C-alpha cells in the first residue's frame, strides 16, 4: 500500500473491516447470500471502498483461489461493473440477485 496517504490507509482498513464483517456474517449463517449481495451493493457505492478494492486487486490475485473468497470477489467486481454501466440513478435496483439456495463459492463461477 505504498504510495497511499495515512488517511487513505485508514479508510482502506475500515473498508476491509466492513467487507470482512459482511463475509463472516454470511459464513456463519447470520445473513443469506441475497442479503450479502445487498450489503456489498451498498459498500460499492462508497468511493473509499472502491479505492480499497482497486488497491488490493494485486493482493487478491496473488492468493490461491478459495471458493468463498473467489465468489465474493466476483460478486463485488460484477456489482462495480454493473453500477458503473447502469443507466439509472436508482443504484439499489442494479445487479442480478444471486440464487438464494446457492453458496458464495458457486457465485457465477468462472467457466
Image (cartoon, rainbow, N blue to C red):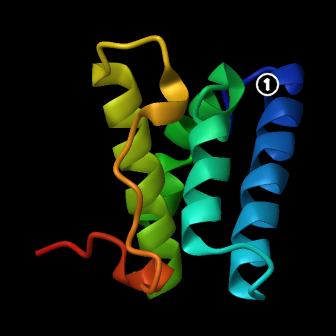
Q: What residue is pinned by disc 1?
A: 8
Which residue is drawn at the image coordinates 70% and 76% (left, top)? Answer: 26
- Front residue of 91/11: it is 91
Q: Position of residue 86 (x, y in %)?
A: 32, 21
- Front residue of 16/37: it is 37
Q: Quadrant of the C terminus?
A: bottom left
Residue 29 lies in what quarter of the image? bottom right
Q: Position of residue 21 (x, y in %)?
A: 82, 64
Which residue is drawn at the image coordinates 19% and 72% (left, top)? Answer: 110
Label 1: how many Cα within 10 Å (few below 14, some 14–19, many 20+) = some
- In the displayed image of the protein, which residue is found farthest to the left? 111
- Front residue of 42/90: it is 90
**With 1 as the anchor, is 21 left or right in this view?**
right
Q: Is residue 9 above or below residue 29?
A: above
Q: Secondary structure at mark 1?
A: helix
Camera sees residue 66: no
Camera sees residue 24: yes
Residue 33 lies in what quarter of the image? bottom right
Q: Is residue 41 above or below residue 26?
A: above
Q: Quadrant of the N terminus?
A: top right
Q: Position of residue 7 (x, y in %)?
A: 88, 21
Q: Is residue 107 above or below residue 84?
A: below
Which residue is drawn at the image coordinates 86% and 42% (left, top)? Answer: 14
Q: Position of residue 88 (x, y in %)?
A: 37, 13
Which residue is drawn at the image coordinates 43% and 57% (left, top)? Answer: 75
Amino acid at each position: 500500500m505504498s504510495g497511499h496517504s495515512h488517511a487513505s490507509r485508514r479508510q482502506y482498513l475500515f473498508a476491509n473491516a466492513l467487507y470482512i464483517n459482511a463475509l463472516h456474517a454470511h459464513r456463519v449463517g447470520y445473513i443469506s447470500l441475497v442479503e450479502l449481495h445487498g450489503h456489498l451493493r451498498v459498500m460499492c457505492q462508497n468511493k473509499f471502498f472502491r479505492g480499497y478494492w482497486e488497491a488490493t486487486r494485486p493482493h487478491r490475485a496473488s492468493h490461491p483461489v478459495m471458493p468463498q473468497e473467489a465468489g465474493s470477489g466476483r460478486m463485488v467486481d460484477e456489482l462495480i461493473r454493473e453500477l458503473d454501466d447502469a443507466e439509472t440513478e436508482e443504484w439499489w435496483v442494479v445487479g442480478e440477485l444471486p440464487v438464494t439456495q446457492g453458496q458464495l463459492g458457486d457465485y457465477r463461477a468462472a467457466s
